[in-house]
Amino acid sequence: MDFLNAIILLLNYIFIPALTYGSQLALGAIFVTLIYGILRFANFATGDMMSFGTMATILFTWYFQSLGVSLGVLPTALLAIPFGIILMILYMLLIDKFVFKYYRHQKSPPVQFAMVSIGVMFVTQAVVRIIIGPSDRRFFDGEKFIIKAREFKEMTGLNEGLALKSTQVITIFVTIVLVSLLFWFLNRTKTGKSMKAYSDNEDLALLSGIDPKKIVLVTWVIAGILATIGGVLYGLDKSFKPFTYFNNMLPIFAAAIVGGIGNPFGAFLGGYVIAFSEILLTYAYKKFFMYILPESMEPNSLVQLLSTDYKFAVSFSILVIVLIYRPSGIFKGKVL
Amino acid sequence: MRKNLNVIAAYSIMMVLILMVGIFQSWNIALSIFNLCLISAVMTMGANIQWGYAGLINFGIMGYTALGGLAAVLISVDPVQEAWRAGGFDILMCLWLIIVMVLVIRFILKNFEKSKLRTYSIAALIITGIIIIRVTAEPGIEKIEAVNPATTGFLGGFGLPIIFSWIVGALFAGGLAFIVGKVALGLRADYLAIATLLISEIVIAIIKHEDWLTRGVKNVIGLKRPAPYEVDLQTTDWFIKLVEKFNSGKLSVIENLADRQAALNQLVIEGSSIFVKLCYSGLFLVVVIILLILTQKALYSPWGRMMRAIRDNEEAANAMGKNVVKQHLLIFILGSAIVGIAGAMLVTQDGLFTPGSYRPMRYTFLIWVMVIVGGSGNNFGAILGGFVVWFLWIEAAPISMFLINFFTAGIPETNAIKAHLIESVPYFRFLLMGLGLLFIMRYRPKGILPEKIEIK
């Protein structure tokens, strides 16, 4: 019984939250990696682009709510996502046309692109804050829990409860569907393959008749989908605040690089690596040991490797270590 | 004279703008903008040395600024004797343990060949080391933080004049830059940018949460000042006389004696805060001028030429026998140290240390906008960038307020869109910065005052 309690404890406080957070990071990391692999720059506006997409979705959610349209137990935001994506893609294409295109034609070095993306970051941040304001916004509606902790306890007779939020299930489900679709697209369709070819060797790809304009367009479309959905899932699970989204850029970068930048599958796994290590290293295991160890050996302290204040620092340290010892990432991305 | 015309013109325009703020808004605002412009200029010079001279990208400016600020706290605050007695020994033990750990790792690295076993044993050593250090430090930290937590709860500093912290801040930042440089300088440019950005976040996390050292988010307030206090000035005879003399024309118009005294008191209160700000301006100006002279000398020295050679063609410089790695490390340390000075100056001016206020937007990306807008590789450009960007950053709200009112003049006050726009005026500064950066990068990629190398 104690053993089961211990497992439920870990499931409730480590596994499910980390899986959810990891999925949110993974979508952002694939976005970063695609931009890096195909357009060849580190996009510092990642977090703010995600917040723009989320903002667009929130605006449509409010509109639907005012019309009285809803999905019942599911959040209305799911209905609004497609419209948010369209707005996000339009914004990205606008930015690309007026900003990035010029530098692409000039064949500017990546550093210059990165600087330009900082300009885009400032502008996007301003746009989001001017439109929706800087404050915290919750836009979740519908049923909050699938299983409540108390009900679970009554059902199984265990001491530990397992709470399963509907946002967690939605996040994991949507991520699986979206990522499978994406990999199918990249590996099986002609456009996806030509994108890969373009990423591997631009000149050869151009020689074999691949249209660079189309590649760039498709990349931004996929990026828009990933950014919006990743942002909305994060916002549904926690809450929407432009500043938090800007900060999320850092663990997302960490995930993309840990997984090997330019490698979408690596980025996908990188998200989970970052999320799990953040939560595993900062969780206090006292209760867990109380269940599995005999009473005489129970620990006095919290058995916490690092205090939760250092959550972000953990993922950054992992990234720094990976950068130093294996700059191509765990799953071998582009060697830089 | 002729060839420096654009520099002189740019600086004159800037000064006129600040004077206009003084005339139309108030001299207090103008001087506080001017002081922060000077501090920004120091930061920009640090970043410019790294980016403009050597082409190294450092997105960790926030971390070095915060370390400079930490130096100001550790130098100027009086030591908290009680806390030292309670937990000082544990902390010193910890420090000693860290030194031992580093020495052991160095020893292993030097004396054993590279192998999997070595890597794993070092990793194991670091993990056990961290656990042992945590166990040793915990009781001490708890005791220190329990000492009068409302006002102290930390070890305090050395109780020296705060001016010294400007040098110590440089040393702290340089020390951190040494470690970061050793670790990260081999990376490609955009990786280096991300790595330094994340390392600076780690530094901030440590400063925010190690309460025994920095009081963390509880902030340290009431730091000593190198300048006199306003309250003291208001009761000092010579200062009152000075204010009277300056405003004798204004005062002599007032006939009634009591009214005149009241007016004088008001003027003294205003004058005292202006006087204090002027003291700071003087100190900061000295720093900026010294740094400007040094960096200018360096730029035109053989060393400066070598740095440019390395920046423009690393392989060729390497082939000519220049030690690229060593020079990169050196310039990384120098630039970061200058940023550290600026960090200490900032805390000195504010008189308080708030770890929560260090955010990458304000302390890293804004500084980079200054460098790019001003003109990388040109010290005068870097300083000008600091002035222009900080001025716009502060004055963006009034300017956009004016523009909104101008364009929506026909719309009534109750209009929802107009009210919303007026409410979000503070965020137009981001828009202004972003657009400014994008336009400068597109149409004047070398900045307002481009780099100009002349062989003398």
Image: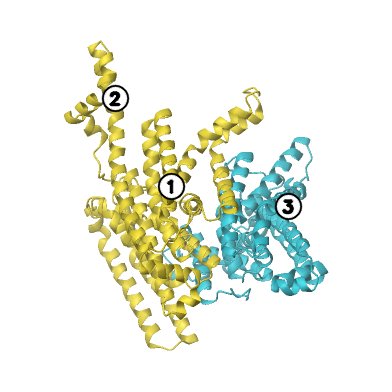
Chain colours: A cyan, B yellow
What residue is rendered at 63% in x and 54% in y? A149
Vertically, is B78 above or below A263? above
From the image, tell me which residue sits under label 3.
A89
Of badges 2 and 1, nearer the viewer stands 1
- Where residue B149 appears, as percent x and y from the top left, is 32, 48
Residue B267: mark in rendering: 2
- What's the amino acid at mark 1? Leu
Between disc 2 and disc 1, whose residue precedes?
1
Q: Report, in whole angstroms, how far the alpha carbon at label 3 lies from the one at label 1.
A: 46 Å
* Labels 3 and 1 in the same subunit: no
Q: Report, in whole angstroms, how far the alpha carbon at label 3 lies from the one at label 2.
A: 58 Å
Residue B294 is left or right of residue A101, and the answer is left
Q: Which chain does the residue under circle 1 lie in? A: B
Decide: few, some or many residues near mark 1? Use Cα within 10 Å; few <14, some 14-19, many ≥20: few
Q: Report, in whole angstroms, how far the alpha carbon at label 2 lies from the one at label 1.
A: 39 Å
Mark 3 and mark 2 in contact? Answer it, CB < 8 Å.
no
From the image, tell me which residue sits under label 1.
B5
Q: In the displayed image of the protein, which residue is found farthest to the top?
A: B256
Vertically, is A63 above or below A161? above
- Where residue A310 appears, as percent x and y from the top left, is 47, 60
Residue A278 is left or right of residue B54, and the answer is right
Vertically, is A86 above or below B196? above
Mark 2 falls on what kind of element? helix
Residue B361 is left or right of residue A17, and the answer is left
Front residue of this view, candidates B453 and A200: B453
What residue is rendered at 36% in x and 52% in y? B342
